[in-house]
Image (tube, rainbow, N blue to C red):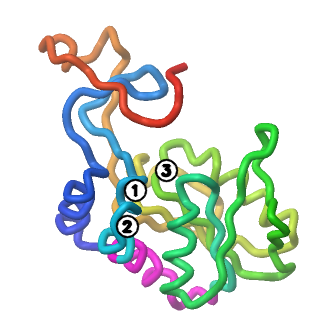
Amino acid sequence: MANEERVITVLKEAQALLEGHFLLTSGRHSNRYFQCAKIFKNAKYSEELCKMLADSYKDAGIDLVVGPAMGAVIMAYEVSRHLNVENIFTEREDGVMTLRRNFEIPEGANVLIVEDVITTGGSVKEVIEIVKNAGANVAGVGCIVDRTGGKIDFGTQFKSVISIEVESYEADECPLCKQGLPFVKPGSRKIK
């Protein structure tokens, strides 16, 4: 969809794409790490990347954009701004993804679900169920970074600004460890 070279440049400038040796939340190791929250520190990055995604859905008849908190709160706003529609977000309450703050999804609405980075798609799948339970249509799923390399299936149209399959390794098979390179543990979740 977008010029991959330009997207990589923006991700690096925003310090959202890091290269090195990383210990992931899963316990696996990788030479690349995406910290997509950094995109939203500066409107010039979020505006450009979210516009790329919004442009790919401009003819889809989207009525509402929904993103799971925390990572997609600002993103849902920015994508909806480009589509000229409203946005809301879901959040966890007692570990369950839900609508709060008197947010509602109108029955029959065409909903675009957005997420900053997709690795397993777990949060998006939870939001899909919320949308369906509201009697609305899941018109599509969009993200900035698809870490699956296009291998994930949400049962609806799925578009990303960039799709990259990021290699990861079990700790005892990690070539970076074998080279003696120290690792960094970035991120916001605890290691399993």
Crowding near pointer 2: few (<14 within 10 Å), some, many (20+)?
Answer: many
Residue at 31% x, 34% y is 167
Report which residue position mark 1 lands on.
145
In space, the residues marked 2 and 3 are separated at their CA atoms by 11 Å
- Helix, strand or loop at label 3? It is strand
Q: Is residue 46 above or below residue 170?
A: below
The reply, left or right, for residue 186 in relation to residue 191 is left
Report which residue position mark 3 lands on.
118
Nearer to us in this view, 128 or 186? 186
Report which residue position mark 2 lands on.
161
- Helix, strand or loop at label 1? It is strand
In space, the residues marked 2 and 1 are separated at their CA atoms by 6 Å
Q: Determine the image quadrant of residue 103.
A: bottom right
* Tag 1: amino acid: Val
Mark with earlier residue (2, 1): 1
* Tag 3: amino acid: Ile
Q: In which quarter of the image is the N terminus?
A: bottom left
Locate residue 90, reporting x and y percent: 71, 58
